[in-house]
Amino acid sequence: MGFYRLAALEFSGGGRFVRKWLPIMSPSDEHEIRQRTLRALAGNRNPGYHFAGHFLDLQCRRFEAGEVVFELEPGPHCVDPDGTMNLGALLLFADMALAASTRLYVDSSARTATLCLRVEFTGVPARGLLRAEAKSDGFSPHTALAQAACEGTVCAAGTEVVRMSGIWVAPPAPEGRALNPLPWEHNDAAPVTALAPAQLDVLEKNVMRRIGLALRDAPHHGFPRSLWEPAVRHTPRGAASRLAVGMHVGNRAGHVQGGLLLYAALATAIGAVPHHPLLTAASAWFISPGQGKALTSRSTVLQKGRNVAVVRTEVFATGGKRVLEAVSNHAIAARR
């Protein structure tokens, strides 16, 4: 992760101040992130996947009836200043693994979408190589729009970090948009060569601009937070935020990717209860696609006790259309 700098002196209680160190991006880290972006943009030109998936470079290790297995390598592009996996990257990883387990039961050209998602955090740091395992029994024939339940875990060094479950549906693809198979659904994926900056179109240049801004702000918040986290502000009842919509957070249907959509909601919820900094669980219901120029989130504190807090978060598209609702649990860390 390069070198570290002293960010601030923080009061820790008991009359003591502690030094807080943040990593400084080395020139090699910045170069690697820019090259990773150019490779991801090149991969994104092949229909079927999305920029964020290419950028994180999720690796499918098993994709067969009964179970799917994915791995996610850490790096300066996806870890927070403390060396743990960024929550947005972790939620995207979990969402993609669960979705893949349901896609074993549909045609590779079909669209699948998250209906609801639950995540539970064990408290184990998401540090190092992450491995996600997920399974589904397929789609139920008892609803007009078939639904598939799935469950799984994310582990670090063999220890559970996240327990997850959800329900997926297989709606029609957006009109005028063909969906090609995902990379792990076919065996003829060709190696991707990074684009040259001169080859970028307008939307791709916008992604590179966002990457540049995130690299600039990385010493203050960490790179992935600067790239994917919405701008959060406190409100009398909790917190609110705004997330600009673009290719950097989009899925293959052109909407905000489900894991990153949930990240926007939970980042806002975390901001609503700063004295309960540990996110322990969340349940989310996906109501409509995240689309338009920006999404706004509104978090309301439902309960705040000595040790536990509960927050409700609503996400809206431009014009006030409801996109997602989430309820999250937050806690205070145990004294050591």
Image (tube, grey):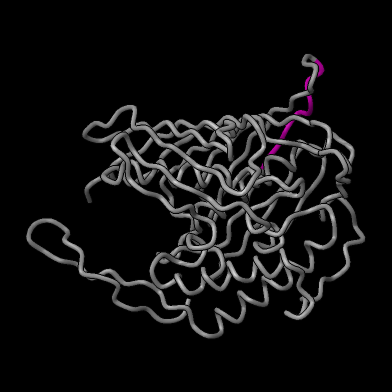
Query: From the viewer's perspective, is 12 left or right of 230?
Result: left
The residue positioned farthest toward the bottom in the image shown: 27
Task: Please identify the dominant SS of the magenta region.
Answer: strand
Labels in figure, total = 0
Q: Is residue 122 above or below residue 46?
A: above
Q: Position of residue 11 (x, y in %)?
A: 16, 61
Q: Residue at x 71, y 49 (%)?
A: 251
Query: From the viewer's perspective, is 122 left or right of 53?
Result: left
Q: Residue at x 66, y 43 (%)?
A: 291
Q: Position of residue 117 (x, y in %)?
A: 59, 34
The residue positioned farthest toward the top in the image shown: 142
The residue positioned farthest toward the left in the image shown: 15
Residues 336 and 274: in front is: 274
Query: From the viewer's perspective, is 135 left or right of 321?
Result: right
Q: Residue at x 12, y 56 (%)?
A: 13
Residues 282 and 176: in front is: 176
Q: Residue at x 85, y 60 (%)?
A: 46
The residue positioned farthest toward the front in the image shown: 319
Q: Is residue 216 above or below residue 70?
A: below
Q: Is residue 177 above or below residue 106?
A: below
Q: What is the span of residues highlighted in magenta in the rendered image?
A: 134-141
Q: Is residue 135 magenta?
A: yes
Q: Position of residue 207 (x, y in %)?
A: 65, 66
Q: Position of residue 222 (x, y in %)?
A: 45, 66
Residues 326 and 315: in front is: 315
Q: Is residue 248 magenta?
A: no
Q: Is residue 107 above or below residue 35?
A: above
Q: Quadrant of residue 39?
A: bottom right
